[in-house]
Amino acid sequence: MPSPGEQPLLDLEIPDLAGDLRALLSQIPRGRVTTYGKLAEALGNRIAARWVAMFLQEHRSDPGIPWHRVLRAGGPQHPGRLPACGGSRDDFQEKAWRLRAEGIEIDQHGIDAARFAFDTFVGGRPLERLRHVQEELAGKVSLQGPRRLPRLVGGVDVSYPDRRTAVAAYVLVEMPGGRLVWSTTVGQPVRFPYVTSYLTFREMPILLAVWDKARAEGKLPDVLLVDGSGILHPRHAGLASHFGVVADAPTIGVTKKLLWGQVELAGLEPRQSRPVLDGKRLIGAAIRPTDGSRRAIFVSPGHRVSVTYARNVVARLLLGRRLPEPLYWADRLSRAAGRASGKE
């Protein structure tokens, strides 16, 4: 477990991002509009704009949510204008009716941003604070680790049977062979939404809980595979890296999509790997796992392993499925536990 110097990373207060967004929305005056991107910037990172749009769509019926005052950004065809359209025809008509009732003028090109736009938000910029945590943690990641291949490999994955619940599964498999030897699951309320590059703050609490359960049973692995990025991350501190530093464990990140880096995938053969680079720096590998899968998976060190070691471990655990055996079983068991919890 982490030393006293690492404890703030473990005890990090997960912000109430929905509450922060509600506070920002309440600042938009009657007769003014803003954009999804401006709200995301006020939260600390424009990358959250998609989540902002999803939140507003899901909470349209909430009388305290002025969803109609939030628009898409204008395009280059009509500079200085904000389009009032978007979504279904009924959505547009209701939004336009509400805005006109507040005194906002709408013409065929949209809304005059100079007259009606609002962006002077006041808030704590929680995503900016979390980004600084990731940047600090990246300096603690070690790419030095074992050379001998592991005997026991763990895998963790999280599923979401509903919007409010997360279920994490931990499995332990033997290598070689990939035989499943032990597993367990944990369920918890979801405390943070999905925002690209901030998965750590959504899944870290429940992964630490299932890890502690495995520790209590004496079932910790030689190395752990995490369904999330390691250093293949904009700040080189994805979920696998963050977890590895906090738990002081060798970890490897595996994802189905490339979050960061450059790789040439054309002509990639089954079970062949290609380097993933950040400029000239080697930060991971792309592997085409099977004959039947044309899509690669992306592997990177989390903590206390090298790129070569991470690639070699994952390659030896690709036994005919798209995912390496530990993550295949963790995914399957977390989903099964989630379905079972929904029936209770």
Image (cartoon, rainbow, N blue to C red):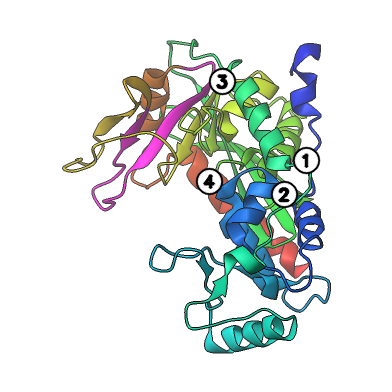
- The residue at the far left in this view is 267
Callout 4 secondary element: helix
Tag 3: residue type?
Answer: Pro
Between the C-alphas of marks 1 and 4, the distance is: 28 Å
Q: Residue at x 81, y 63 (%)?
A: 26
Q: Which residues are magenta?
A: 284-305
The residue under label 4 is 329
The residue under label 3 is 250
The residue under label 1 is 14
Which of marks 3 and 4 precedes in the sequence? 3
Could you tell me if the residues under marks 2 and 1 are in contact, i.e. CB atoms within 8 Å?
Answer: yes
Residue 153 numbered tag = none
Which of marks 1 and 3 precedes in the sequence? 1
Mark 3 vs mark 1: give the one in front: 1
Between the C-alphas of marks 4 and 2, the distance is: 25 Å
The C terminus lies in quadrant: bottom right
225 lies above or below 23: above
Between the C-alphas of marks 3 and 2, the distance is: 26 Å
Tag 1: residue type?
Answer: Ile
- The residue at the far front in this view is 115
- Is 304 contained in the magenta span? yes
Which class describes the residues within 10 Å of circle 1: few (<14), some (14-19), or many (20+)?
some
The residue under label 2 is 192
* Closer to us: 248 or 234: 234
Between the C-alphas of marks 4 and 3, the distance is: 20 Å
Between the C-alphas of marks 2 and 1, the distance is: 7 Å
Q: Residue at x 40, y 31 (%)?
A: 314
Which of marks 4 and 1 precedes in the sequence? 1
Callout 2 secondary element: loop
Which class describes the residues within 10 Å of circle 4: few (<14), some (14-19), or many (20+)?
many
Measuring from the top left, give residue 66's x and y in whole percent: 75, 72
